[in-house]
Image: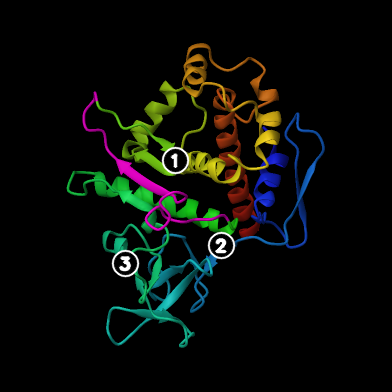
Amino acid sequence: MCWAFWVRACIGNGLKLPVCGPAGSTVHLNPAPCGPFIALSLSRFCVKLFTCTHCGQVLYFENSQCEKCHFPLGFEATQLQLRPLVAEPDGHSYRIYNEPASCAYTYCQNHDHQACNWLVPTDSATPFCLACDLNRTIPDLSQPGFLQRWQDIEAAKHRLVYSLLCLHLPVVSKRVYPDEGLQFDFKADESPEQRIMTGHDNGLITINIAEADAIEREQARQAMHELYRTLLGHFRHEVGHYYWDRLIDKSPNLDEFREIFGDDRQDYGEALKKHYAQGAPPDWQQHFISAYATSHPWEDWAETWANYLHIIDTLQTGHAYG
């Protein structure tokens, strides 16, 4: 895998990739054996540390109310900010605190389930925010434990969408763009014999809600011999497949992709069978970001993508907290 190609592929498709850090500084990413250091400008980044502009209290990304001044809070996606709100006389809509000329907002409909704190303009054609409008299927919330699992899934998905927006990547729903959009199914196993497989298919990402259960996820991690398995990590990985379709496939970047990652035309199913039967090559750490990345060029890309997002989020958090 190679960070250089990943960045060039995105920039070559008209996408800007700001990397967080002190303004004007640079970061060098040099995973062997890709060659020279890749210097990325850190002059533009999203702030991971939110504060209440009413009282100055530090806020968490999922907060719907400031713990100090008790103002209601909502995430405004166009500004990528968590903002204190002032209720309108109708008792249903809000405006941004200290911005009386701002447009009126309501909470996303999934706020009713404590699964979302993002805002929706009152004149929106959908009751859902940008992140929740990507959902096609959610779990049956009448089932015991499914509400908590879905809430945890939404928290991870919202963090993913935030990262994608920070990177100026296109985030569009299949509801609006059926061919090029992104969509999510969050499903539970119907029976031990009918297991839901987490994966990606032409813009549709399916997540088994068992991944939101820490015990089941740890059991799967050990069974799959994975060193790192998280709910957010699943989202990062699977969305990497989606952006491969958007950024690489049928683009001028495809030949260079094959030079670096390998030929994606090799049989994917057979490659996975071979990987699970034989494992990764003994020297995989010298050439790949993970053992699973050795299985097929598509998985090398998705693992590289997921780890890039992980690194960026870590740098953003570290910079924000000093």
Seen at 33% across and 85% down, the residue is 88
Give the amino acid type for the residue marked by disc 1 in the picture: Asn
Q: Name the residue carrying label 3.
A: 127
Is the residue marked by circle 3 packed among few (<14), some (14-19), or many (20+) residues within 10 Å? some
Q: Above or below — where is 36 with respect to 171?
A: above
Label disc, if present, on residue 49 of the rendered structure? 2
Of the pair 209 and 183, the residue shown nearer to us: 183
| Dots 2, 3 in contact, CB < 8 A | no
Seen at 40% across and 43% down, the residue is 204
Residue 76 appears at what percent x and percent y? 47, 69
Which of the two discs, 1 and 3, sits closer to the camera? 1
Residue 231 appears at what percent x and percent y? 43, 41
Residue 24, quarter of the rendered image? bottom right
Q: Above or below — where is 212 with respect to 261?
A: below
For the residues labelled 2 and 3, the Cα–Cα distance comes to 28 Å
Instruction: Identify the element where label 3 is drawn.
Output: loop
Give the amino acid type for the residue marked by disc 3 in the picture: Pro
Label disc, if present, on residue 115 of the rendered structure? none
Which of the two discs, 2 and 3, sits closer to the camera? 3
Is the residue marked by circle 2 packed among few (<14), some (14-19), or many (20+) residues within 10 Å? some
Q: Which region is colored magenta?
A: 169-193
Q: Earlier in the sequence, mark 1 or mark 3?
A: 3
Instruction: Identify the element where label 2 is drawn.
Output: loop
Q: Name the residue carrying label 1.
A: 202
Tell whether position 238 is magenta: no
Tell whether position 188 is magenta: yes
